[in-house]
Amino acid sequence: MPGLFWAFIAATVALMAIPGPNVALITTQSALYGRRAGLAVVGGVTLGQAVQIMLVGLGFAALLQVWSGVFHALRLAGAAYLVFMGIMALLAAFGREAKVNLAPPPGLGHFFRTGMGVALANPKTMLFHAAFFPQFIDPQRPVLPQYIVLGTVFLILAFTLDGLWALGVGALRGVLRHPRIQKLLHGLSGGIYIVAGGLLALRRAP
C-alpha cells in the first residue's frame, strides 16, 4: 500500500500540473476579480470533484456506462450550462465599457457556484475518476478505507495546487486591471466556457 500511495500522489500531481478547463477558469476569474474570487472558484471546483468522487464510490459511474441515456442527459445539460456562462462572459467583454468597468463584482457565492457547476458539468470526469482510482487500490486490503484516503488526498492536492494558481494570478491583478485587458479576460473566459461546452456536447458516451 505505501508504494501505491506514493505512486498515486505522483500521478495526481503530474496530472494536475497540466492546465485544463478548471485552471483556465480559476486563472481568468482571479485575474478579473482577485484572489478571493479565485479561491472561491477553487472551493467550488473542489466540492464538485468531491461529489463526483463520492458518486463513483456509490457506483454511479458504472450506471453512466450502462445507461447511456443518463450520460447524454448530463452531458447536454452540462454543455448548455457552460455555453450559457460563455455567452454571459462575452456579453461583458463586448458590452459598453462603462458597464464592464463600473458594475459591482459578483459575490463570492457566485464564484463558488460557478466553480462547482463547471466541475459537475462534465460527466466524463466522473468516468475518469472511476478508471483512475482503482489503479492505486490494493485488492488484498479493504477497498473502502483506501478509497476514502485516496479521495481525500486527491481533493487536498487539487485544492492546494489550484489555490496556488488563484493566489499567483490574483497577485497580478493590479497589472491586469486596465479596461482593455479586463475586456480581453472576459472574452477569454467566455471563449473557454463555449469551447468546453461545445466539446462536451460532441463527446460520445464510452
Image (cartoon, rainbow, N blue to C red):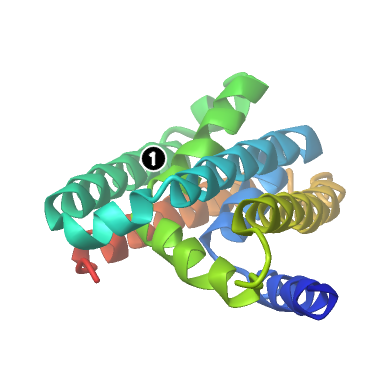
In the image, what residue type sits under mark 1?
Met
Q: Residues within 10 Å of mark 1 (few under 14, many from 20)?
A: many
Position of 110 with respect to 175 (left or right) is left
Which residue lies under the disc numbered 1? 85
Q: In what quadrant of the picture does the C terminus appear?
A: bottom left
Q: In what quadrant of the picture does the N terminus appear?
A: bottom right
Q: How many marks?
A: 1
Position of 129 with respect to 9 (left or right) is left
The quarter of the picture where residue 35 lies is: top right
The quarter of the picture where residue 39 lies is: top right
In percent of the image, x 37 and y 61: which residue is there?
124
Closest to the observer, 162 or 55:
55
The residue lying furthest to the left in this view is 69
Closest to the observer, 198 or 205:
205
In percent of the image, x 19 and y 47: which residue is there?
70
Q: Residue 178: x percent and y percent?
A: 71, 46
Look at the numbered disc 1 and give the secondary structure of its residue. Answer: helix
Q: Is residue 46 visible?
A: yes
In percent of the image, x 36 and y 55: which residue is there?
61
The residue lying furthest to the front in this view is 140
